[in-house]
Image (tube, rainbow, N blue to C red):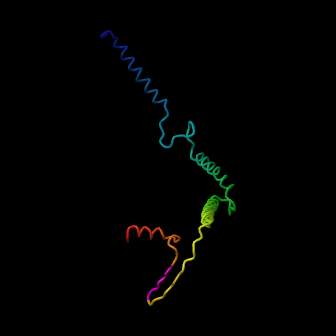
Amino acid sequence: MVDGFNVQTRVSSSELLKDESSTQIDERKPRKRGRKPANGRQEPLNNVEAERHRRKKLNQRFYPLRAVVPNISKMDKASLLGDAITYITDLQMKIRVMKTEKQMVNNKGKQLPVPEIDFQERLEDAVVRMNCPLDSHPVSEVFRTLGNIKL
């Protein structure tokens, strides 16, 4: 007995702790490197299953695209993407044309007068003169700004 403790009990309890920790390490699986399993799965998918899952998700995303895009030339994914890009650019161009037409309809009340154009040819150059009211000319703001700064 040392200081009220039995020496043999102390040694035996430390040995028990060593034995328990070594069994815990042996029972645990070795830690693997790499990606962790997603979507709540316990085990990660192997490569074939992961690739199959990826392709399935990709195909699921192509179905709505195939339904929206008209005039698909081929049914493969590359052609579908090319046709989708062409369709989207056509739609963007139609939007621009419609906005321009709307602007023209809105500006129809403001009829711009036809400017008088005078062209004089010289030996090495030419002079073009345009006469129109300053307020209706597209560059009128530039002229006003230059006039304000007395240039």
x and y percentages locating residue 20 in the rendered image: 44, 23
Viewer-side residue, 40 vs 11: 40
Q: Is residue 78 visible?
A: no
Give the camera-side residue of 132 and 15. 132
Q: For residue 25, what is the image quadrant?
A: top left
Quadrant, the N terminus:
top left
Vertical position of residue 79 compared to residue 9: above or below: below
Task: Report the magenta stretch's main SS.
Answer: strand
- Residue at 56 percent across and 38 percent down: it is 43
Give left or right: position of 102 versus 122: right
Q: Residue furthest bottom?
A: 123
Q: Is residue 126 magenta?
A: yes
Residue 26 percent coordinates (x, y): 47, 30
Q: Residue at x 43, y 23 (%)?
A: 19
Residue 14 lies left or right of residue 27; in this view the side is left
Q: Which residues are magenta?
A: 124-130
Q: With respect to residue 1, does 53 lie above or below? A: below
Q: Which residue is nearer to you in this view: 39 or 127?
A: 127
Which corner quadrant of the image does residue 85 belong to?
A: bottom right
Q: Looking at the picture, tell me which residue is in the foreground, 85 or 144.
A: 144
Image point (48%, 36%), residue name: 30
Residue 90 percent location from the top left of the image: 63, 64
The quarter in which the C terminus is drawn is: bottom left
Please, is residue 87 above or below residue 133 in the view?
above
Residue 22's spot in the image, x, y percent?
Answer: 43, 27
Find the residue positioned furthest to the left: 3
